[in-house]
Amino acid sequence: MTNEEQHQPTNVEKLRRTGAAAAPSLFTLGNLACGFFSILSASNGHFSKAGWLILIAAVFDLFDGRIARLLGTESNFGVEMDSLADAVSFCTAPALLMYFMVLQQYPLWGAPIACVYACFGVLRLAKFNAMAYAGEGSKKYFSGLPVPAPACIFASFAISYSIMEYNMGGHNLRIMEVYLPHLYNFVAIAMIVMALLMVSTVPYAAFKAKREKKMSVWFLLLLVVLVVLLVRYPQDVIFIVMSAYVAFGLLAVLYRAFKGIKVEK
């Protein structure tokens, strides 16, 4: 290697000079800001707005890591910062949203359930980081339910219920209109179940590994239908898809146990 090549700046150095390397951190800060304002909105009784802010935080969270990998700017600082933002947006914010919206009417056990949910979510984040640093993580599966999934479920529920109960702007699927009042009564139980799943070892698909098989026509058709429904009923589609994700993880455990199949790393 010549002296000229040695002094030639790398792609990462070029990105740092242009400021593009800071993009992942900006997305993480956007995630954190949404979580913060979601808490404020929930405390003021604006439950639909609080729910939307959690969903927007999930969009920021979806892209910050991917942008960091794309730019080659991954770092321990970014991982820790992402976890701290997630602790606010996907642990504390949904817990307080459900507390102010539902659990507040139960003085004895409403607050403890919300607290347990938030604490177990933080434990899930700490476990994820510890496994990542120890090189025990898997590209195919998460160990335990990832915190954005239940956060999106409770956020979308808050939006859907607000549309139905308070005549907020938006539309709900008819099936959601039928079951929303019943779901409202099971929020406390759902939060306990989600909290336990987050700290469990139940494997959930990570969708990080490259697809080896091509998508089938039926899968593409389902994807198109979901996108169309997402435009008109975004909160309902998110609620159904995330709920299915949680349910399929549990069903997969039972299927593997019945068939004696081990989880691939």
Image (tube, rainbow, N blue to C red):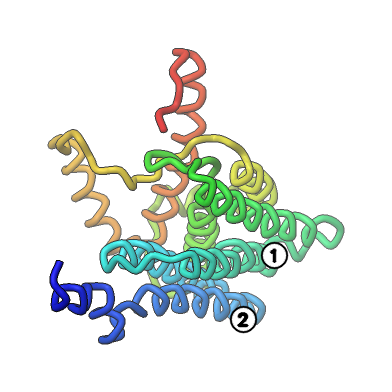
Using residue 210 as the reference point, say whether residue 208 is left or right of it.
Answer: right
Q: Quadrant of residue 244?
A: top left
Q: State if disc 1 and disc 2 touch (CB < 8 Å).
A: no
Dot 1 falls on a residue whose secondary structure is: helix
Using residue 69 as the reference point, say whether residue 11 is left or right of it.
Answer: left
Residue 164 visible at all: no
Q: Which numbered marker is on residue 40? A: 2
Eyeballing the image, is 134 above or below 212?
A: below
Q: Which residue shows up at 54% across the image and 46% down it?
A: 134
Residue closest to the eye, 214 or 189: 214
Residue closest to the eye, 110 or 18: 18
Amino acid type for the residue under numbered disc 2 = Leu
Compare marks 2 and 1 and give the one earlier in the sequence. Answer: 2
Structural distance between the alpha carbons of marks 2 and 1: 13 Å
Q: Which residue is mark 1?
A: 99
How crowded pointer 1 is (Cα within 10 Å; few <14, some 14-19, many 20+) is rated as: many
Q: Residue 184 in the image: x percent, y percent?
A: 62, 54
Q: Residue 70 in the image: x percent, y percent?
A: 26, 64
Q: Residue 185 in the image: x percent, y percent?
A: 66, 50
